[in-house]
Image (cartoon, rainbow, N blue to C red):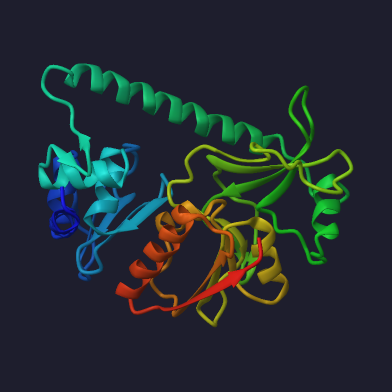
């Protein structure tokens, strides 16, 4: 399939009606406000009477229980139907192939459905594991986490989205960071996240003098579902710095910026960024691979559609 045809299919998917998509997935939505918002029980978590909402004017959606929101029909299809970007576009355009990927035929539909159920179970187990690990965390102060961050030059307060996970058996000491919605207990002051289903682990040496530099030295447990690691609150300046690494986001916090860490550059385009922001700084490592560069470009393009000023800052890894 040519690039032009692929682009045409993506654009076709983006023109789908979000209310129709929601209804196809079993949503029962009623008019909630006079600003184009409709609300009802969430088709994914099944809770509440108005926890899930779609704003047809802004082309956004949000489930306050799942903690997941997004912009446009494709994001909505990913949330309601699962899968990745390609699979969502195929479903929205009734396309059997897209970029070489095939939809299951009638003969193997049952096997595909079973595989999808297994994938969902595995994902739920990952989320449960992430919640459990977060419950085991200890304060960062006085731990190898504090030592690690001080050695790297960060002298400020460690936000409550970061904790210390002690070594357990074969598992090393680690800095544990939560992917979660911001919880401001006062304007500009972060509190501990209320619900954590995804975490980022940075494995540390016992004395915290450095991180363990191996392939699995940094891992994510539980798909973040568009949530960031919030390092500092968004202030009156309505600007935000987005970085790949937690350490980089802490540097922005120290400089007085609102900062989020994605945990991985590939997750940049999935972040659910508030639509009231006016300026976004995206930090891209100079050694970013092609996938990371594409992710940065994709986020920049998404923000350009919202007329947000985007600043790309090249930085040493």
Q: Residue at x 18, y 27 (%)?
A: 104
Q: Residue at x 77, y 32 (%)?
A: 172
Q: Position of residue 247 (x, y in %)?
A: 69, 59
Rendered position, 275 above or below 48: below
- Total numbered badges shown on the rendered structure: 0
Rendered position, 57 above or below 129: below
Does the image show residue 203? yes
Q: Position of residue 103 (x, y in %)?
A: 18, 32
Rendered position, 126 above or below 262: above
Give the residue at the far front of this rendering.
Answer: 2
Q: Give the quarter of the figure containing the C terminus.
A: bottom right
Side of 284 where 67 appears, left or right: left
Q: Nearer the viewer, residue 88 or 229?
A: 88
Q: Position of residue 30 (x, y in %)?
A: 17, 53
Does the image show residue 42? no
Q: Nearer the viewer, residue 243 or 120?
A: 243
Q: Nearer the viewer, residue 168 or 190?
A: 168
Q: Position of residue 271 (x, y in %)?
A: 44, 57
Q: Residue at x 20, y 17 (%)?
A: 110
Side of 270 where 95 appears, left or right: left
Side of 110 where 126 appears, left or right: right
Residue 25: quarter of image: top left
Q: Nearer the viewer, residue 141 or 47?
A: 141
């Amino acid at each position: 399939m040519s690039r032009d045809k692929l682009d045409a299919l993506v654009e076709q998917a983006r023109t789908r009606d979000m209310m129709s998509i929601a209804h196809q997935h079993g949503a029962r939505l009623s008019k909630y406000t006079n600003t184009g918002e409709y609300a009802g029980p969430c088709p994914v978590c099944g809770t509440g009477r108005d926890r899930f909402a779609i704003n047809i004017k802004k082309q956004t959606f949000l489930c306050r229980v799942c903690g997941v929101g997004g912009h446009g029909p494709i994001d909505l299809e990913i949330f309601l139907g699962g899968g990745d970007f390609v699979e969502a576009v195929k479903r929205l355009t009734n396309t059997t192939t897209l970029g070489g990927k095939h939809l299951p035929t009638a003969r193997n539909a049952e096997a595909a459905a079973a595989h999808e159920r297994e994938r969902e179970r595995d994902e739920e187990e990952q989320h449960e594991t992430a919640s459990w690990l977060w419950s085991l965390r200890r304060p960062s102060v006085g731990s190898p986490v504090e030592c690690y961050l001080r050695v790297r030059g960060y002298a400020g307060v460690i936000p409550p989205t970061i904790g210390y996970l002690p070594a357990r058996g074969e598992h090393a000491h680690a800095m544990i960071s939560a992917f979660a919605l911001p919880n401001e207990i006062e304007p500009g002051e972060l509190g501990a996240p209320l619900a954590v289903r995804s975490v980022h682990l940075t494995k540390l040496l016992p004395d915290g003098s450095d991180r363990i530099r191996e392939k699995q030295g940094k891992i994510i447990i539980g798909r973040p579902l568009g949530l960031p690691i919030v390092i500092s609150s968004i202030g009156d300046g309505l600007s935000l710095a987005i970085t790949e690494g937690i350490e980089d986001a802490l540097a922005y916090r120290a400089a007085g910026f609102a900062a989020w860490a994605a945990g991985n550059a590939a997750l940049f385009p999935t972040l659910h960024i508030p639509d009231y922001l006016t300026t976004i700084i995206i930090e891209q490592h100079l050694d970013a691979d092609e996938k990371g560069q594409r992710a940065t470009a994709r986020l920049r393009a998404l923000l350009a559609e919202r007329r947000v000023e985007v600043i790309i800052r090249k930085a040493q890894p």
